[in-house]
Amino acid sequence: NRMPSVRVVGIDVNDMSKSKTLRRYLEETDDANAVYMAKRQEIALRNKKHEMLTAFGEECGVEVDEIAMRIKDEDLEKVWNKMVPSKAKEVTKRTDVYKILYACTMIAIKQKYNASRRPPATAIQKLTTRLVAILPNNKAMRRQTSLTQEVFCKHITELLLKVHQQMVDEIK
């Protein structure tokens, strides 16, 4: 009398040999979600008080961490394909990184205010400079910084949160 097969993320729950893997996956996922939920609550509280932490937030009406959290659930591959010329898998020009960040900022502003307001170019340029500074270097390109589609789609949220934290730490 065998139990019916129940799968969580492709792992059979009844398979005892995989229980450790499943438990580790669920704990890691739970920890990551807890961090994101705490960040969402922090942003909601800040928005309720109408307060901005950084000059970027004052200029654009949306903080960098809020951009990160709002684009987290977007189809980032679609954003990449729309903003990157010729469907390249990597961009090395700062203007291309600028376009991508501009699009992400517009998404966040539109979601927050339900209106299309343009962020100031200087604020996005400063954000681009900060993001480019923490991107991994491509050694084949002789230290030229590059943003790959994979890094954008999988890690842009963490990178933007890191940039936001740097901005906040500079104020303190």
Image (tube, rainbow, N blue to C red):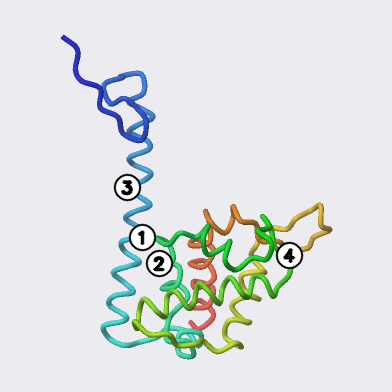
Q: What residue type is labelled 2?
A: Met
Q: What residue is rendered at 57% in x and 66% in y?
A: 82
**Occupied quadrant, residue 141:** bottom right
Q: Which amino acid does label 1 sit on?
A: Tyr
Disc 2 packing (10 Å; few <14; some 14–19; many ≥20): many
The residue identified by callout 1 is: 36
Could you say whether the residue bearing mark 4 is in a helix, strand or loop?
A: loop
Q: Distance between the residues labelled 2 and 4?
A: 25 Å
Q: Quarter of the image containing the N terminus?
A: top left
The answer to whether the residues at label 3 and label 4 have Cβ atoms under 8 Å apart is no
Disc 3 packing (10 Å; few <14; some 14–19; many ≥20): few
Give the foreground label among 3 and 4. 4
Task: Give the image location of residue 138, x and y in percent.
Answer: 75, 55
Could you say whether the residue bearing mark 1 is in a helix, strand or loop?
A: helix
Q: Residue furthest top?
A: 1
Which numbered disc flags the more N-terminal residue, 3 or 4? Answer: 3
The answer to whether the residues at label 2 and label 4 have Cβ atoms under 8 Å apart is no
The residue identified by callout 3 is: 30
The residue identified by callout 2 is: 69
Q: What residue is rendered at 56% in x and 73% in y?
A: 101
Disc on res. 92 = 4
User: Which one is in front, 53 or 145?
Assistant: 145
Give the foreground label among 4 and 1. 4
Disc 4 packing (10 Å; few <14; some 14–19; many ≥20): some
Q: How far apart are marks 2 and 3 (CA)?
A: 17 Å
Q: In this view, does 128 lie to the left or right of 50?
A: right
Task: Give the image location of residue 22, x and y in percent.
Answer: 35, 31
Q: How far apart are marks 4 and 1 (CA)?
A: 30 Å
Which numbered disc flags the more N-terminal residue, 2 or 4? Answer: 2
Disc 1 packing (10 Å; few <14; some 14–19; many ≥20): some
